[in-house]
Image (tube, helix red, strand yellow):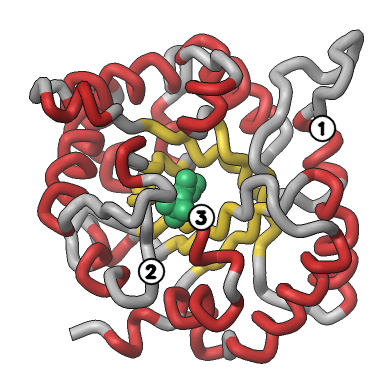
Amino acid sequence: MSGKSQRRPLVSGNWKMNLNHYEAIQIVQKLSYLVSKDDFEQVDVSLHPPFTDLRSVQTLIEADELRFVLGAQNCHHENSGAFTGEVAAPFLAKLGVRYVICGHSERRQMFGETDDVVAAKVGAVLVHGMTPIVCVGETQDEREAGQTLERVTGQVRGSLAGRTADQVAGIVVAYEPIWAIGTGLTATADDAQTVCQAIRRTIAETWNDDTAQSTRLQYGGSVKAGNIAEIMDGSDVDGVLVGGASLDPDEFARIVQYPQHSR
Ligand code: 13P
């Protein structure tokens, strides 16, 4: 088996800096009524609350045996030490976190995370048995200058530097064009597919083809219930990373249920 059929779709909700732990519990409870066992047969679903909510969401997922997978939005690359305000990967692993977003464009832009920093975080996440979701994406200026593919594939190589083929096979790369995040603008399904295809080709060239066929690729940027089916049609698009629309349980449940509405 090769190609899209071997890669399970992954729908991830990145709550960013929204929802306290009481609100988090309410949202997860609502989602648990809306998303059925059958939905989970078709799609993996990860939820990425703020750090302060993780313990509450973990407890709820475990107590009610929910099939949502716990995710985090960031971590530090060191295991411990004098890094005031930071959270280490082993702490997240202890909380049952399975996916960690690394190098989200908001962190790259606002907190100065370079590809080297992201690569170190990816290493820490893997060492502690979790899966990094590595974000890449171009700015509006880079897009207008025709530099999208160069920029994105450069970020893939830089952020995954030093990783083995086996490691890369198990990770997730999220293509999130910066101009489409929180703006209501979405890359066309064709653009999302073209960039994801280029990312897969870069992985094949840098590691090997089998690795590239295993790595899951997501699209992110103003994903909603109304556009997910079209985006997921792309043969190299294996999932979505959802921001704003993941804060509304009804909308997020409809996104998760996209296979029912696919053409
Ligand atoms: P929006 O879905 O709000 O555009 O955010 C995308 C994103 O940044 C997810 O990580």
Name the image quarter holding residue 59: bottom right
Q: Position of residue 113 (x, y in %)?
A: 54, 16
Which quarter of the image is occupied by the N terminus? bottom left
The residue carrying mark 1 is 90
The amino acid sitting under disc 3 is: Gly
- In percent of the image, x 43 and y 82: which residue is there? 257
Q: Is mark 2 within 8 Å of ligand 1?
A: yes
CA distance for labels 1 and 2: 33 Å
Q: Going from the N terminus, do you reach mark 3 or mark 2 first?
A: 2
- In percent of the image, x 65 and y 31: which residue is there? 125
Other residues around mark 1 within 10 Å, as few (<14) / some (14–19) / many (≥20)? many
Q: Going from the N terminus, do you reach mark 1 or mark 2 first?
A: 1
Report if residue 162 is visible in the image.
Answer: yes
- Nearer to us of marks 3 and 1 is 3
- In percent of the image, x 33 and y 51: which residue is there? 219
Q: Going from the N terminus, do you reach mark 3 or mark 1 first?
A: 1
Instruction: Identify the mark at residue 243; answer none if there is no mark.
Output: 3
Q: Is mark 3 within 8 Å of ligand 1?
A: yes
The amino acid sitting under disc 2 is: Lys
Q: Position of residue 111 (x, y in %)?
A: 60, 19
90 and 164: which is toward the camera: 90
Vertical comparison of 96 with 73: above or below: below
Dot 2 lies on which element? loop
The residue carrying mark 2 is 224
Q: Position of residue 88 (x, y in %)?
A: 80, 27
CA distance for labels 3 and 2: 9 Å
Q: Residue furthest front?
A: 183
Q: Is residue 45 left or right of residue 146?
A: right
Vertical comparison of 170 with 3: above or below: above
